[in-house]
Amino acid sequence: MAVGGEEDGRGLLWGGIACCCAGAGCYLMGRSRAESAAALRSARSFCRISDLAMTLGASSGYLPLVTVSGRVGSDTPIIGQQSGLEAAIVNNEVTQHFLKKQKNKDGEEYVVLKKTKEEDGTERCLVRKEEKDARWIECSELISSKTRKVPWHLDDGTGRLEIVRASSADGFVLRFGSEVFEKQPRTCGCECSVKILGLKRTEWVLPIGEHLTVVGEAVKDDSGKILIRRPRDGGPFHVTRSSIGSLISGLEYGARWCEFWAAAFAASGVLLLGGYAMC
């Protein structure tokens, strides 16, 4: 085989292996999504928290997988400093925005000469190198993030329940509260390579009254409280604004696409490896 043929053969070989690996990854991802959808379908659904409480009382205070909905409530809510919203969780982030000079490798440099005069009459010459056609890229950096929270629960008017470590559940995100940008223009860095634009203060909240759906393991403790927590067997644990039907349909849709791409990559891999075998 000639040198050019060897290189083409290697390209076919590694391309085929890469496509087969990608197909296997898509297949496993699709299978995982399909299994998650099946697990959510098996969850016992309750329309009211009071029905869940009655069922727990008749089943030794434990159910392996349930789904129920309610609205966020708290006996001691806090007020967002920026948004003014009543919430159970408030997160304040401060981000600095700036422009950073990106040097061009082949750019031409020129010298900038600036004369300044002191109060005593002394003249000074400042020399600075500038690069022609240099680009300025907008960047940002998180300076601080502070979270305040109080005990909260879900309430649907018939009862209430508490969620254990809700922030670790799938689908749990805070809602955007408000955003304020404070301009602080100034230049700094070596050779004035950074231009500070200002600070962006963003507030994220879990507002009181937010409607949430929770999927997880249900237990009733010694005091009679209903708790929803992550299943001990590693089952699904969701705290989300979406309905259980939306979660299932989203997972099944993703599984179908993963199956399609798995078949496409596998077929491409077989063709490439077949071409390598024929070289």
Image: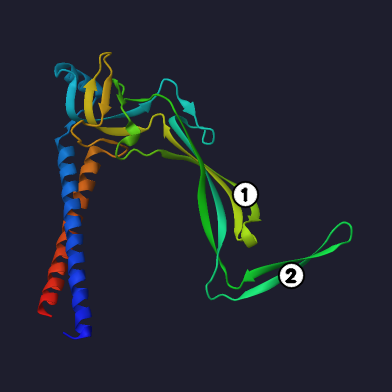
Residue with the most extreme right position: 120
Q: In which image quadrant can residue 219 be found? A: top left
Q: Say what amino acid the circle numbered 1 marks.
A: Lys
Image: 207 above or below 50: below
| Image position of 21 with respect to 170: above or below | below
Q: Which mark is residue 113?
A: 2
Residue 14 x/y as whole percent: 20, 70
Please tell me which residue is depicted at 26% across the width and 29% down the height of the picture: 229
The image position of residue 198, as x and y in percent, is 59, 49
Sort mark 2 into few (<14), some (14-19) or many (20+) by Cα contacts within 10 Å. Answer: few
User: Which mark is nearer the camera, 2 or 1?
Assistant: 2
Q: How many marks?
A: 2
In the picture provided, is 152 more to the left or to the right than 86? left
For image coordinates 24% across by 42% down, the residue present is 247
Residue at (68, 72) in percent of width and height: 111
Tell me the tag on residue 70: none
Residue at 48% across, 26% down: 78
Label 2 to label 1: alpha-carbon separation? 29 Å
Labels 2 and 1: the sequence-earlier one: 2
Nearer to the camera, 4 or 48: 4
Secondary structure under the numbered disc 1 in the rendered image: strand
Of the pair 80 and 123, the residue shown nearer to us = 123
Q: Quadrant of the N terminus?
A: bottom left
Q: Residue furthest bottom?
A: 2
Q: Position of residue 116 (x, y in %)?
A: 80, 63
Q: Secondary structure at mark 2?
A: strand
In the image, taking residue 90 as reference, residue 231 lies left or right, namely left
Q: Amino acid at mark 2?
A: Leu
The residue to which callout 1 is attached is 183
- Give the position of the C terminus as an image quadrant: bottom left
Decide: few, some or many residues near mark 1? Use Cα within 10 Å; few <14, some 14-19, many ≥20. few
Q: Where is residue 51 shown, x and y percent of the image?
A: 20, 22
